[in-house]
Image (tube, rainbow, N blue to C red):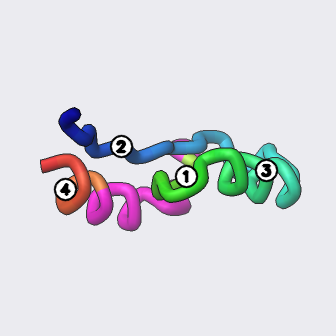
Amino acid sequence: MTHKRALIVVNKIDLAAADDLEEVKSIAGEIPVVAVSAEGGAGLKILRGRSSTRLT
């Protein structure tokens, strides 16, 4: 069995409750979760770094 690399990206984090993000992280298990706000720019640097190291 081959293992696939994965990364969960949660957008519109500025509109979500903190509990929502914690629930996503809990469900994701070992898959990394990156929270971003595309409009405000929050988390985009982290996303770029994670996606380049995690998915290549």
Q: Which residue is mark 2?
A: 6
Q: Amino acid at mark 1?
A: Val
| Dot 1: element | loop
The answer to which of marks 1 and 4 sits earlier in the sequence is 1
- Camera-near label (3 vs 1) is 3
Q: CA distance from mark 1 to mark 4?
A: 16 Å
Left or right, residue 13 beside residue 7: right
Q: Which residue is mark 1?
A: 36
Q: Which residue is mark 4?
A: 52
State the extent of the magenta-drawn residues as a range: 38-50
Q: CA distance from mark 3 to mark 4?
A: 25 Å
The residue shown at (79%, 44%) is 15
Q: Which residue is mark 3?
A: 23
In the rendered structure, does residue 47 fall within the stretch colored magenta?
yes
- Camera-near label (3 vs 4) is 3
On the question of residue 40 being in view, the answer is no
In the rendered structure, does residue 4 fall within the stretch colored magenta?
no
Q: In this rendered view, identify the residue nearer to me: 26 or 49.
A: 26
Q: In this rendered view, identify the residue nearer to me: 2 or 42.
A: 2
The residue shown at (31%, 61%) is 50
Q: CA distance from mark 4 to mark 2?
A: 12 Å
Quadrant position of the N terminus in the picture: top left
The answer to which of marks 3 and 4 sits earlier in the sequence is 3
The answer to which of marks 3 and 2 sits earlier in the sequence is 2
Q: Callout 3 environment at 10 Å: few (<14), some (14 to 19), or many (20+)?
A: few
On the question of residue 5 being in view, the answer is yes
User: Where residue 10 appears, x then y in whole percent?
Assistant: 59, 43
The residue shown at (55%, 52%) is 36
Q: CA distance from mark 3 to mark 1?
A: 16 Å
The answer to which of marks 3 and 1 sits earlier in the sequence is 3
Q: Amino acid at mark 2?
A: Ala
Looking at the image, which residue sits at the far front?
1
